[in-house]
Image: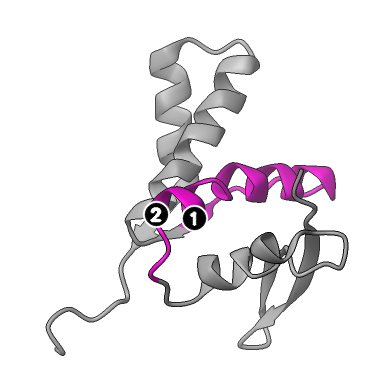
């Protein structure tokens, strides 16, 4: 089991930001740096990063937050939609309705510059 802490602060003084942190003494060393690779540049496999998208949604729910919109960046964040879809289906919605609900909750952009542009 990997233990996670919730760290929070503000981005540019107005946007609330919540991050998972695995750099905890009770975790094995190989897991302590895991979230550093999720949030920063990494050569780690995308599968390691994917495993945290559902945990982020669950963390927000655990602290009582229900965001209307999730900001997504880069390709691996698409796995966030799978957790949102799971929630919608678990609430009893049909697949099409659940999918449409997920689409209205997600905002995707890419800020990484390509080709040095």
Cβ–Cβ under 8 Å for marks 1 and 2: yes
Circle 1 crowding by C-alpha within 10 Å: few under 14, some 14–19, many from 20: some
Question: Could you tell me which residue is drawn at 84 percent across and 50 percent down?
Answer: 63
**x, y percentage for residue 25?**
87, 68
Q: How many marks?
A: 2
Q: Is residue 53 left or right of residue 45?
A: right
Circle 2 crowding by C-alpha within 10 Å: few under 14, some 14–19, many from 20: few
- Region rendered in magenta: 43-71
- Residue indicated by mark 2: 46
Question: Camera-side residue: 115 or 106?
Answer: 115
Q: Is residue 45 above or below residue 98?
A: below
Q: Is residue 8 above or below residue 13?
A: above
Question: Could you tell me which residue is drawn at 49 percent across and 52 percent down?
Answer: 48
Q: What element carries label 2?
A: helix
**x, y percentage for residue 114?**
17, 78
* Mark pair 1, 2: CA separation: 5 Å
Q: What element carries label 1?
A: helix
Question: Could you tell me which residue is drawn at 59 percent across and 73 percent down?
Answer: 36
Which image quarter holds the C terminus? bottom left
Q: Quadrant of residue 79?
A: top left
Which image quarter holds the N terminus? top right
**x, y percentage for residue 90?**
63, 16
Question: Could you tell me which residue is drawn at 52 percent across and 70 percent down?
Answer: 37
Marking on residue 49: 1
Q: In this view, does 8 lie above or below 71?
A: below
């Amino acid at each position: 089991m990997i233990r996670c802490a919730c760290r929070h602060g503000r981005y540019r003084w107005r946007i609330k930001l919540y991050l998972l942190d695995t750099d905890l003494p009770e975790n094995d060393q190989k897991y302590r740096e895991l979230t550093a690779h999720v949030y920063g540049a990494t050569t780690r496999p995308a599968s390691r990063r994917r495993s945290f998208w559902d945990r982020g949604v669950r963390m927000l729910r655990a602290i009582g937050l229900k965001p209307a919109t999730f900001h997504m960046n880069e390709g691996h964040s698409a796995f966030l939609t799978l957790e949102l879809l799971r929630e919608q289906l678990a609430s009893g919605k049909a697949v099409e309705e659940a999918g449409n609900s997920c689409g209205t909750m997600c905002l995707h952009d890419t800020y990484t510059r390509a080709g040095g542009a």
